[in-house]
Image: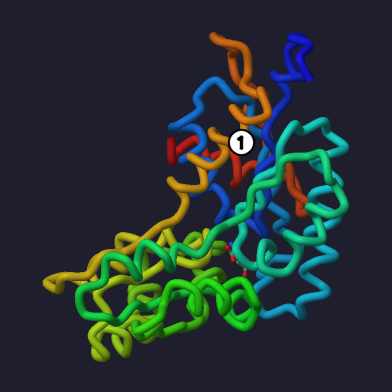
Amino acid sequence: MNDKVNGTGNNAPIGVYDSGLGGLTVWREIRRLLPEESLMYLGDGKNCPYGSRPRGEVQALADAAVADLVGQGCKMIVVACNTATAAAIDFLRAKYADLPIVGMEPAVKPACLHTRSGVVGVLATERSLDGDLFRRTAAKYGQGIEVLMVPGRGFVELVEADREATPEAEACVRAAVEPMLARGADQIVLGCTHYPFLLPVLERVVAGREVTIVDPSPAVARRVAQLLDERALRATPGHAPILTFRTFADETYRRRLETKALASE
Ligand code: DGL
């Protein structure tokens, strides 16, 4: 993949996919770290939220989304959705053996390494929490640590409705987080890419306590950079990136993705 024509070869876009707006929190970290890379964001939108759907359905949705991005010529795929990663990453890697695919890594490891209280809270969608990925990660790094897994009920819907800064959002976040705080959690892992949009509200809820909120998206962006280097896939130096936005919903939703992305830069 070394031809240097704009938009193909190494200058082809990195595909970034989520059920909706959430993956934009990963998109912006990739933009910060890799400003010369073209990015093609696909926010499904039509089938969001994924978090309460059966696993097989999420896998089929992820399959269709990644097929779309591959069809558009993406040189790498970032599954910027914990729910789709948990349901489909092994399937996708088997299907596209030669394509580099980065998934979300629940940031349970750093949280378990840094906790002083020995209690770590994990917020994610129902589907993520009952999947192997989260269970395995918690079992691997959470020995001797109490890992509290709590679904962020209503969080995704609030973000999708642009209601992440409302009193309703604060009440919703408080209901999920206060029981964790009462148990002594001093690390709260954001296990869904929509949740960093709720950070201002989360920070209000934990204000005055020694609590660290752990967002894995900068680490995912670093993994993207590392994989580009390993596969010699970096865009040519000085490349002017092309940023595109796709959706399975309608043009209004596509424009929302674009506006929210560019506002977050
Ligand atoms: N943003 C997603 C995640 O990281 C999925 C949210 C959803 O569609 O329920 O899990």
Please name the residue shown 83% across and 45% down the image: 97
Assign a secondary structure to mark 1.
helix
User: Position of 146 compared to 86: left or right?
Assistant: left
Above or below residue 77? Residue 211 is: below
Please name the residue shown 46% across and 83% down the image: 149
- Colour pattern: rainbow
**In front: 219, or 176?**
219
Please name the residue shown 30% across and 82% down the image: 119
Label 1 neighbour load within 10 Å: few <14, some 14-19, many 20+: some
In the rendered image, residue 46, in percent from the top left (x then y), is placed at 76, 61
Ligand 1: give its quadrant.
bottom right
In the rendered image, residue 48, in percent from the top left (x then y), is placed at 69, 66
In the rendered image, residue 135, in percent from the top left (x then y), is placed at 56, 79
Which image quarter holds the N terminus? top right
**In front: 113, or 67?**
113
Query: Which residue does the numbered mark 1 point to in the structure image?
Result: 227
User: Position of 55 compared to 254: left or right?
Assistant: right
User: Position of 84 compared to 97: left or right?
Assistant: left
